[in-house]
Image: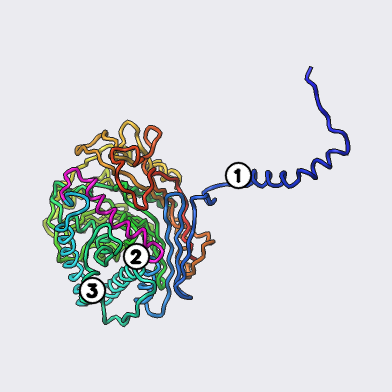
């Protein structure tokens, strides 16, 4: 028989009174635990705010290993507004920006088995001097290009970008903004800077303007200095766009060094809004090339695997052209025109463009002297526009480009570009994985799942890793590189973006896009630096365990 113990009448009330505070606490804990979701704040989550003046402020949020920056800047003078936006950006992320310089150098070395540039870490004095000379030459060309430009729209937008970059630099090194000439008659040419501002360095307490330009222009730079056979910073991302009857879904994963500091950024500057996946702190565009603006344009980019390079220093590098297109374009044609202003041959890629105003999807591809624009023809197909107009084939891969989807896996869609660049499909499983599942994409959750698809028997998948040393590829290598993030967005999520007034509010319910920071999990583990063959690698603002969950990021802007 089981004995039972009863509490005598009258004692129940006394017991409840005695333990009442404990009961309340227990109930609250249970309720909080039962209601937690992606909006909850864990001990690793935080948000910092910086106010520059009544019209300009920003915040940076840390959600597990993901950094989410928001900046608002309004001013009667648009160039001053851009400068202030940059200053806030630099101020909030000054330590991470300095880390990004050194991480970029380390990445160039550790992900290149040939170690062609730099040949060692730290980079040699000669390599730093060569980098400085190339960057200075291109920056001088860019300033001259802007000052002499006869198109007032392009000139004005370029001025805005230059002042934004200068603001990031000053925010990183100064306590207060400088009093500058914002009349539109002056730009910060090389003569404006001191000698120390123009030195490229590594692992120093000091940080220069050329260090910042190195962070921004690193893809163009390495496209110039590295021989074609050692272009290991190419052949990166996987992406797709899928059009359904009532929405358009876009998703992208950046294949990058596991030292990269992929993050999110939201910017509102005098009416211009954009939300971006930023490749590294300090970059004034996306850099990983995924995002959208408040003019109804969404975009992503995938690099074209390339064996032929004809790079130029005296040209408008891709860093500037992509920034123009991503931030300021209001139509597919504008995006195309900004992106192809001058072809530099330093970074050649495929850009998918979504115009949510017309519900259309299109594509731009480029080589060192040719561009191909796949423009919707209003009849369920594409008009193929080439530059030059004559002598360029208009044939393309119909498996990659259809009226209702476009796939990106570092292989040119245009057969002319593919042949000219000797492009190869170096991780072919991604193509068949995307083709097998693209018509399953009917909502954002399926889009999120597809862009993070990993076959454990072939980690060179849509969402994949090089470090494991196996997988289906024509170019085998074992390097700490692969999918570092994943992002997904739907056109329907942009419905309220045009109504933004440019007010920072950390409690705003407005959303940017879904994003996760972290590598694929294979055999139960994400990439872990301390357990890898690169365990001695110095980590700067990069976690040891490169992992994280999906988050529906807030813009913090109303």
The alpha-carbon separation of the residues under discs 2 and 3 comes to: 30 Å
**Circle 1 residue:** 33
Answer whether residue 105 is magenta in the image.
yes
Badge 2 element: helix
Q: Is residue 214 visible?
A: yes
Query: Left or right of 1: which side holds 352?
Result: left
Q: Quadrant of residue 387?
A: bottom left
Question: Magenta part mainly helix, strand or loop?
Answer: helix
Badge 1 element: helix
* Image: 394 above or below 521: below
Q: Residues within 10 Å of mark 3 (few under 14, many from 20)?
A: few
Residue 189's x, y, as percent? 22, 75
Residue 557's x, y, as percent? 48, 65
* Image: 263 above or below 153: above
Range of the magenta residues?
90-116
**Circle 3 residue:** 194
**Circle 2 residue:** 327
The alpha-carbon separation of the residues under discs 3 and 1 comes to: 56 Å
Q: Is residue 388 visible?
A: no
Query: Which comes sooner in the sequence, label 2 or label 1?
Result: 1
Badge 3 element: loop
Query: Which comes sooner in the sequence, label 3 or label 1?
Result: 1
**Cβ–Cβ below 8 Å for labels 2 and 1?**
no
Residue toward you, 274 or 162 = 162
């Amino acid at each position: 028989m089981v004995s039972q113990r009863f509490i005598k009448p009258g004692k129940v009330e006394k017991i409840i009174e005695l333990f009442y505070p404990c009961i309340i606490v227990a109930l609250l804990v249970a309720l909080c635990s039962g209601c937690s979701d992606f909006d909850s704040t864990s001990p690793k989550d935080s948000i910092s705010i910086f106010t520059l003046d009544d019209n300009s402020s920003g915040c940076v949020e840390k959600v597990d290993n993901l950094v989410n920056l928001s900046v608002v800047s309004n001013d009667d003078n648009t160039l001053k507004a851009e400068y202030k936006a940059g200053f806030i950006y630099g101020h909030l992320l000054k330590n991470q920006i300095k880390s990004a310089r050194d991480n970029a150098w380390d990445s160039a070395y550790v992900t290149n088995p040939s170690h062609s540039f730099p040949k060692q870490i730290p980079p040699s004095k000669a390599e730093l001097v060569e980098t400085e000379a190339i960057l200075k030459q291109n920056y001088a060309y860019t300033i001259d290009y802007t000052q002499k430009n006869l198109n007032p729209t392009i000139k004005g937008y370029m001025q805005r970008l230059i002042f934004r970059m200068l603001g990031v630099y000053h925010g990183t090194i100064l306590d207060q903004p400088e009093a500058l000439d914002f009349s539109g008659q002056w730009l910060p040419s090389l003569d404006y800077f001191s000698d120390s501002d123009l030195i490229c360095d590594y692992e120093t307490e000091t940080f220069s303007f050329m260090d910042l330009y190195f962070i921004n222009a690193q893809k163009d730079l390495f496209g110039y200095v590295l021989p074609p056979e050692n272009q290991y910073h190419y052949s990166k991302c996987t992406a797709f766009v899928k059009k359904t009857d009532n929405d358009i879904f876009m998703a992208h994963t950046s294949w990058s060094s596991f030292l990269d500091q992929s993050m999110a950024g939201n910017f509102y500057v005098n009416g211009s809004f954009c939300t971006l996946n930023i490749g590294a702190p300090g970059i004034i565009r996306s850099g990983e090339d995924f995002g959208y603006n408040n003019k109804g344009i969404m975009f992503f980019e995938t690099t074209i695997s390339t064996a032929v390079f004809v790079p130029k220093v005296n040209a408008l590098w891709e860093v500037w052209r992509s920034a123009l297109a991503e931030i300021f374009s209001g139509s597919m044609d504008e995006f195309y025109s900004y992106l192809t202003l001058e072809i530099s041959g330093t970074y050649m890629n495929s850009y998918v463009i979504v115009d949510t105003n017309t519900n259309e999807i299109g594509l731009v591809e480029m080589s060192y002297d040719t561009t191909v624009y796949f423009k919707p023809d209003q009849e369920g197909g594409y008009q193929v526009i080439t530059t030059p107009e004559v002598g360029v084939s208009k044939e393309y891969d119909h498996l990659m480009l259809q009226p209702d989807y476009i796939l990106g896996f570092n292989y040119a869609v245009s057969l002319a570009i593919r042949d000219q660049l000797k492009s190869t499909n170096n991780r072919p499983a991604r193509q068949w994985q995307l083709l097998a599942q693209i018509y399953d994409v009917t909502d954002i959750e399926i889009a999120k799942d597809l862009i993070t698809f990993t076959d454990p028997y072939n980690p060179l998948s849509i969402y994949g890793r090089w470090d494991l040393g196996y997988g289906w590829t024509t170019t085998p290598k074992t390097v700490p590189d692969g999918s570092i993030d994943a992002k997904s967005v739907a056109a329907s999520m942009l419905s309220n973006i045009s109504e933004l007034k440019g007010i920072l509010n950390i409690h705003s319910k407005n959303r940017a896009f879904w994003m996760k920071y972290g590598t694929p999990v294979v055999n139960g583990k994400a990439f872990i630096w301390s357990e890898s063959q690169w365990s001695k690698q110095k980590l700067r603002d990069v976690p040891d365990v490169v992992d994280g969950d999906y988050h529906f990021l807030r813009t913090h802007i109303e």
